[in-house]
Amino acid sequence: MEAKIGVFICYCGGNISDYVDCERVREAVSKEPGVVVAKTFMFTCSDAAQEEMIADIRKEGLNAIVIASCSPKLHLQTFRNMARRAGLNPYTYVQVNIREQCSWAHTHHKEAATRKAIRLVRAGIAKARLSIPLEPIKVKTTPAVLVVGAGVAGMRAALALADMGLEVHVVEREKAAGGWVKKWARVFPSGRPGEELVNTLLKGFEERENIYLYLETEVVEKRGSVGQFQVRLKGPQGEQEVEVGAIVVATGFSPYVPKEGEFAYGASGVLTLQELHALLKRGIEGRFVYAGREVRNVAFIYCVGSREKEGHTYCSRYCCTAAVYLGLLLAERYPEVKQFHFYRDMRTYGKYEIFYHNCLEKGAIFLRFEPPDVPKVEVAGERFFIRVKDRLTGGEEVEVPADLVVLVTGMVLSPNENLVNVLKLPVGKDAFFNEVHPKLRPVETVIDGLFIAGACQGPKNIAESVTSGLAAAAKIGALLLQKELRLEPLVAHVLKDRCTGCGECVAACPYEALSLKTEDGKQIAYLNPALCKGEGACVPVCPEEAIEIWGYGHEQIRSMIQGLCKEDL
Amino acid sequence: MEREIKVLVFSTNTISDPGIDLAGASHLDYPTGVSVISVPCSSGIDPRWILYALKDQCFDGVFIAADGEDCPFLSDCTKRTGEIVNRAQALLKENGLDPRRLKMAAICSVCAEPFVNHIKKFVEGLKDLS
């Protein structure tokens, strides 16, 4: 098909035209092969300019357009939509950035900036000339979801998803639902034991017919892609397969387990936060007794397994609050027991500050340390002596006797290598699962249809875990309640006549989007466009140039390079 | 007049492009012979394009503004892009071109100043090569 290209150059009200001679650019590029219209506008993004461009597209029967204006980050979608309104395929639109990457970067060289703008627009025209109309990839959705992990985040997400009318399969590898929360002595804000919170959620499961809970079950295989996953589960009754449109991973955390000897861990009477929960949950009537001996003094040592110089460098964020909250419970039950809290920084953020104050009011004593001067725990028979340089008293060395030492341990990812491998979960630097962007896409992963929620993506308290579980549910609802998904078509495609079936691209693809198959008696690479992310890792490994990304083809890139060089040839 | 050194930058849509855009938005000047072609990810840059730009076309140097650790697609993007650079440099040598004509640096989405510093240094180096 003969190219009929329209080129529209923006003054951006002077932001471009003050530093680039836009009229000269227009004149130079109007002679490029295939260009039938070339115009300048004060603002191409204005309604009036868009109407005029739409009229030109229709009148001249344009099959591609180039707009030289600002960064595509700003207006790529604006002009794609405009192209669609004009009846032009949005993927035959090319945006050339002559503002951020030309006029604004070369404000002192109008002549050179103008020549650069001409080159950039020529490259854009070259790209547009070889552009192919594309349609979004359409995928039918299965109205079902797999939730991996039946802790509070996964359970709350499951309830929300079920209420949207989706079928929910909840997989838990333990014998019971509820995760760590179930084991906790009491939780904010109700002050009830964690188990009661879990039971409320479980009752919600029972009341809904579309939630299926699989205990002692693991995910062993995943096939398919967003909208249509097939997942194989292995449980006490053997293996079975479920079809789902999306997956949410909410496998939670594991408490940090101190090393033998770390703050005397291993000695009887040195507990972790979780072990104190278990002790208080059991409840001891009357006096506070541990291992047959009465406890008069309790020492809490904060930041164990958090904020380390190497290893767990992050703050586990929930532990300060958890420690003072348990300190309060201890003070209520055993007011005669003295508490000493050895902390680095008190991070009882937001609403939880009140617990710190209440704890102070109950008479708990707080001592502040700063690495490398961490508290030293000396074991003296059945007792302990904790020595610390207390920053609150100007670095004075203080010694405190204790009958029980509680190590306020942080969170690490609950290890599950099998799941990471099966689902190809992205793991971040801190060893938790990684979202695409902490603010813009906080529960999505780079794999479409695979979501994460709760403490598996980083330390969270219950409220935050539940919030992210609900966020994942909302995202999945938005995805699956559409009966058909439309995916960005800028993915790879195989040029069958060039492909020799060598398999290099299959090995290079990180998303298992490529496989080899036999077609007309010849082995060639086959691409599942719904799995392809369009990053192009397959492109440079193909010896035959037989695979490329739509919009970034070999010929297209070479002709852009030519366009950028034209004035000098 | 001194001949303008031409540098082709391969940049990525979501990571290094915003960094390079920010350089312009902050009016940080860099040489006008520097032009950008944007691609989805630096792991998808083909060494054959680099050879074409340097051998068959006007460019004096090619700069890969890589995603580095911020890559939204791949956790091993740096390693993969590094392999592309190695292959491309071997290809340049085979064709009698100085491998120093290709340079890679990770440019993050707010790395405006690092980009400008890298590119200025690269252009100076290319002047010496020419």
Image: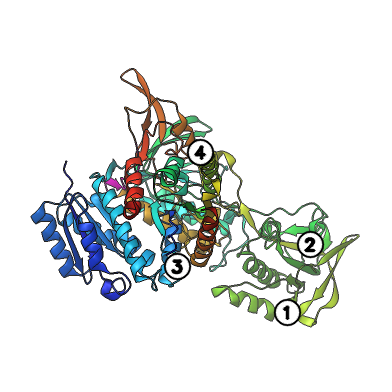
Label 3 sits on residue: B23
- Determine the residue located farthest toward the top in the rendered image: A521
- Camera-near label (1 vs 2) is 1
- Residue type at mark 3 is Ala
Q: Position of residue A147 (x, y in %)?
A: 45, 46
- Residue type at mark 1 is Gly
Colour mode? rainbow
Specify start and end residues of the magenta stretch as a single range. Answer: A482-493
- Camera-near label (1 vs 3) is 3
Chain to which the residue tagged by mark 1 belongs = A
- What is the number of the mark on residue A289? 2
**Cα distance between the residues tagged 1 and 4:** 73 Å
**Cα distance between the residues tagged 4 and 2:** 75 Å
Label 4 sits on residue: B91
Helix, strand or loop under label 1: loop
Q: Residue at x 56, y 52 (%)?
A: A428
Chain to which the residue tagged by mark 2 belongs = A
- What is the number of the mark on residue A363? 1
Q: Residue at x 50, y 30 (%)?
A: A237
- Camera-near label (1 vs 4) is 4
Whether discs 3 and 2 lie on one chain: the answer is no
Above or below residue A141? Residue A336 is below
Circles 4 and 2 in contact, beta carbons < 8 Å: no
